[in-house]
Amino acid sequence: MQFGIPTVIESAIIVNDSINLFIEKLQEEGKSNEYLNELKLNDNYETIKEILNPRNYNLVVTPKEIDDLTR
């Protein structure tokens, strides 16, 4: 029998850390405030994934019954 220990992370922590990493990347690239305003109109999913993946922050949320469903 195998027991898994669930990892619980508040979504607010993930979002806050993600936004900070995103802003750092934009600052490194020298983006202007005008650029930041344009971001609201764009889909930034791929850029955010690019930032999160190397840090293993791109998590997948599964239902609490996942262990039972995969047996």
Image (cartoon, rainbow, N blue to C red):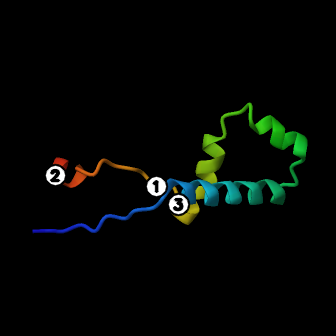
**Residue occupying the far left of the picture:** 1
Quadrant of the image occupied by residue 42: top right
Dot 2 or dot 1: first in sequence order is: 1
Question: What residue is drawn where x is 24% and y is 66%?
Answer: 4
Question: What residue is drawn where x is 70% and y is 54%?
Answer: 22
Question: What residue is drawn where x is 56% and y is 65%?
Answer: 55
Task: Establish if 21 lies above or below 43.
Answer: below
Gap between marks 2 and 1, in whole Å?
A: 20 Å
Kind of residue at badge 2: Asp
Quadrant of the image occupied by residue 41: top right
Do residues under tags 2 and 1 come within 8 Å of each other at their CB atoms?
Answer: no
Q: Quadrant of the N terminus?
A: bottom left
Which label was assigned to residue 22? none
Q: Nearer the viewer, mark 3 or mark 2?
A: 2
Quadrant of the image occupied by residue 30: bottom right
Which label was assigned to residue 68? 2
67 left or right, relative to 29? left
Do residues under tags 3 and 1 come within 8 Å of each other at their CB atoms?
Answer: yes
In this figure, which residue is indicated by the disc labeled 1? 59
Kind of residue at badge 1: Leu
Kind of residue at badge 3: Tyr
Q: Is mark 1 on a helix, strand or loop?
A: loop
Gap between marks 3 and 1, in whole Å?
A: 6 Å
3 left or right, relative to 21? left
- Judging depth in this view, the residue of 40 and 53 nearest the camera is 40
In this figure, which residue is indicated by the disc labeled 3? 57
Residue 24, horizontal then vertical, whole percent: 76, 60
Residue 69, horizontal then vertical, whole percent: 18, 47
